[in-house]
Amino acid sequence: MGSIEPYETSGGRRYRVRYRDPEHRSREKAGFRTKNGPGSATEFLASVTVDMTRGDYIEPAASRVTVGRLGPTWLDAQAHLKPSSAAALEGAWRVYVEPRWGQTPISRIRHSDVQTWIGELRAGTAPTTRSIPRPLGASSVIRCAGVLAGILDVAVKDRRISSNPARGVNLPRKTGKRHIYLSHAQVELLASNCGQHATLVRFLCYTGLRWGEAIALRVQDLDMFRRRVEVVENAVRVNAKIIVGTPKSHRSRVVLFPKFLVMEIAKQCEGRTREDLLFGNGKAYLNQPTAHGGWYRSAIAKARAVDSTFPSPTIHDLRHTAASLAISAGANVKAVQRMLGHASAAMTLDVYADLFDEDLDAVTVALDKARSESVGFLWGLGHSGAPEPSPNVTLTGENDPGTSVPPLGFEPRLCRF
């Protein structure tokens, strides 16, 4: 499989290892100080031979490629993602991953180096293209680590490195933001202060559509007689540009809207063609309100002027409100899943577990009632659960003329063992 040759240098004798790789190309590595023992030429040749026998051989030149050369290729392969998700990955690569790892050969990346970098991202001391570095939240750190790990995953599959040093690092835990749920009265208070966008706000609060799904609705997507709307498109803003695609789940769905919205939605359709957008001027997609100003923040301020306890919901909190109102009205988890377009009922339960806490109380009450009506009735307790009167029972024996026993509260039955 190979040979070991000595040669002389100004620093003394050295050893050169020659071998052929799995594709029969001649390879060599020189500079070994000893022929035998730890770190020797013989040990290296043995390890290469074992790797080739097992199919684990890594070509030295392939492992010297830098992360910066592999990164763009990996990003181009993420075409299956939604534009907003792909843009987030590109931003993480450009701002944080490339500045730290771009010039690093993949064979020189160590697990401990990646773990240190994770800590630097959290502390705001990691290399970045930002003019003013800042600490990153858990979601952003996880995204950056995922980009590096994804690039190195491909390097492993391409047999450039034997394992991925970015996998298995300790990542920060994401802490979910507390949901804000509006009541029916709060929804109406908010909508009444939204001016021309009142119908849109009510629609979001009672259908659970995402902002991008709602502003992408067209008149032709409505079925007014059956009070249904078909969600087939999603319009999201990515890098100051509206991109229209399929809904987040990549599947269309049908959502019902309450009867009280029929007249308002009908007014929205007046003067519009079937191809026109339902909300806005019918031609241009509405911009999502910012957190710092605009008609939506103004509506919240007006609502607080009326009710000082009024919360500060984001646009996405209106979707949470729809889930809350549906569940409080008696909708089961499967119905809520279909309304919101979640991939599974498990996802709905994970997101809105707090809304189903009251169901546990309802279950125990229902079980208690069912037991009292069935088991209690069988034992003579009656439908109400109260003991029915029964006559005294007289027990007689061979030498006992008779003993009167107080009522037992139920009719004794003959039991055989």
Image: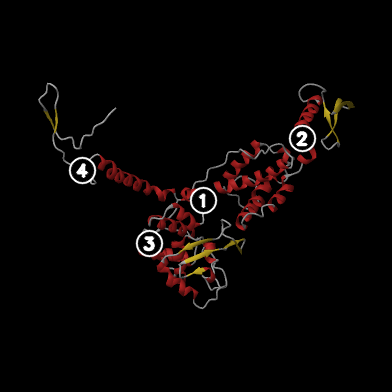
Q: Quadrant of residue 238?
A: bottom right
Q: CA distance from mark 1 to mark 4?
A: 45 Å
For label 2, the SS is loop
Q: Which mark is residue 344?
A: 1
Earlier in the chain: of badge 3 and badge 1, it is 3
Q: Which residue is mark 3?
A: 184
Q: Residue 30: give x, y in percent of width and height.
A: 84, 31
Q: Which residue is mark 4?
A: 386
Earlier in the chain: of badge 3 and badge 2, it is 2
Which amino acid does the dot numbered 3 rest on? His
Earlier in the chain: of badge 4 and badge 2, it is 2
- Of 72 and 100, nearer the camera is 72
Q: Mark 4 packing: few (<14 Cα in 10 Å), some, or many (20+)?
A: few
Q: Which residue is mark 2?
A: 57
Q: Residue 15: give x, y in percent of width and height.
A: 85, 26
Q: CA distance from mark 3 to mark 1?
A: 27 Å
> Which residue extends farthest front?
398
